[in-house]
Amino acid sequence: MNLVNLMDPQQQVSFTEAVKIGLGRNQGVFFPEKLAAIENVDALLAMPFKARSSKILQHLIGDELPSDTLDEMVNSAFNFPAPIVEVEKNTYCLELFHGPTLAFKDFGGRFMSECIGLFNQGERVTILTATSGDTGAAVAHAFYGKENVDVVILYPQGKISLAQQKLFTTLGKNIHCYAVEGSFDDCQALVKQAFLDEEVKSKLGLNSANSINISRLLAQVCYYFEAVAQLPEPQRQQVHISVPSGNFGNVCAAMIAAAIGLPVSKLSATTNQNDTVPRYIKTGNWSPNATLESLSNAMDVSKPNNWPRVESMLNTAIFNKDDFYSCSVGESRTQEVMRHINKLGYVAEPHTAIAYEGLQINKSDNETGIFLATAHPAKFKDSVEDVLEQQLDMPQVLAEALAKPCLAEVIHADYGELKSRLFEKLGS
Ligand SMILES: *Cc1c(COP(=O)(O)O)cnc(C)c1O
């Protein structure tokens, strides 16, 4: 697989290199040089989830990974289902929250962990990442107990839900957590600074594991095929998929799925009140506002880092511009929609409700709609119980995590302090 840096086309790398580097020169993201269509998509759709996923990844990655190795990686990464549930006529929900940390980020995090395990044999790696909620838990669980890997997670003290936090701060072993006295932006700034610090980078073997990593993106392509495969055949002709979007990685994976032959006629990428992209599409001006805190906190992003990939696919007509919709859903509307879905007999957390609303706004009657449930409602227990005025059952993983003590250390938003803590703990 050959990937090109979208900011600097001179830089071309293999899949292996792209996974290890993450981000290219000039802060550029890597994108596949070409996306060939898969032959016989019907036969592919007839296969079981894991076998099909391995085929899709083989098609994308090419001969860099032997197929039996890839089979093994997919078998251990994708060890939980992604079912669709019919919520109303012609409208299905794709449940991506059956993994260990109850959000779709488990798919990408676990496949990335398999890749790093393979590529860094013997070498020491430190995954350093800032989280505003769900990435931290997915990455921590994916790398938990892996040899030669340490994971360092920074999160803003007191600004993420207790359920989100306890899913990673209670693990221990090779998972090291710091509660930063500051905002998510402060955490991200600390991570950036560490990546610019050659001493830290080389001594600890830093890798970032954020959503621009190509391994996470390719893993996500697989569950779009799984969704369509579960539709009754007559309903596969006009499929409209709605993705709740923050960094726009998930919808980018949907576009790649369409590019290699998945029958997707339309895509909706719906944001919360952080609406940089919908405004950009309407006006042509890229003008991010200050990030606002929302019920759907995993989408509180005003500078989506996967947008350059999406835009390049729209500009080169890999995905038709006219079939791509992006609108935003405000806070009070999100709550109304959660109550509406509840009346249909389904419980949706805020991100999922936004995806449902995107479909209602953009879907036409002849289309089959699929909206993504990106997190389990219990992960947003407080807001869901508040809005729906009902109690939720706790999944066992969450109940167990909530009962354990938090092992995170509190630090100031100060790079010098972070650096000395890291060397103390990891610099052997
Ligand atoms: C990360 C996340 C999103 C946003 O996905 P992007 O790929 O960043 O657009 C949506 N919902 C949940 C629950 C998430 O954790």
Image: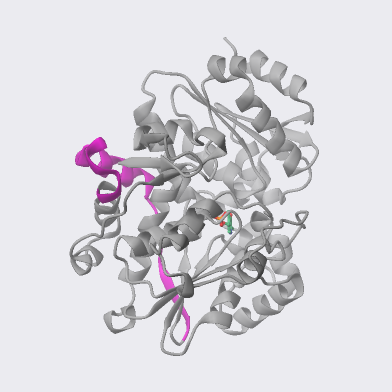
Q: Of all residues shown, which one is farthest toward the bottom?
A: 365
Left or right of 378? Residue 16 is left
Residue 167 % position (x, y): 61, 44
Residue at 43% across / 37% down in the picture?
A: 113
Residue 304 visible here: yes
61 inside magenta stretch: yes
Which quadrant holds the N terminus?
top left
Q: How many marks?
A: 0
397 inside magenta stretch: no
- Quarter of the image for residue 335 reads bottom right
Residue bounds of the magenta highlight: 59-88
Residue 124 % position (x, y): 46, 19
Residue 257 vs residue 321, the one in the foreground: 321
Left or right of 133? Residue 367 is left
Residue 342 % position (x, y): 62, 79
Residue 219 vs residue 409, the one in the foreground: 219
Left or right of 370? Residue 294 is right
Q: Of all residues shown, which one is farthest toward the top?
A: 428
Residue at 32% across / 40% down in the picture?
A: 2
- Quarter of the image for residue 381 reads bottom right
Residue 172, above or below 350: above
Residue at 54% across / 78% down in the picture?
A: 359
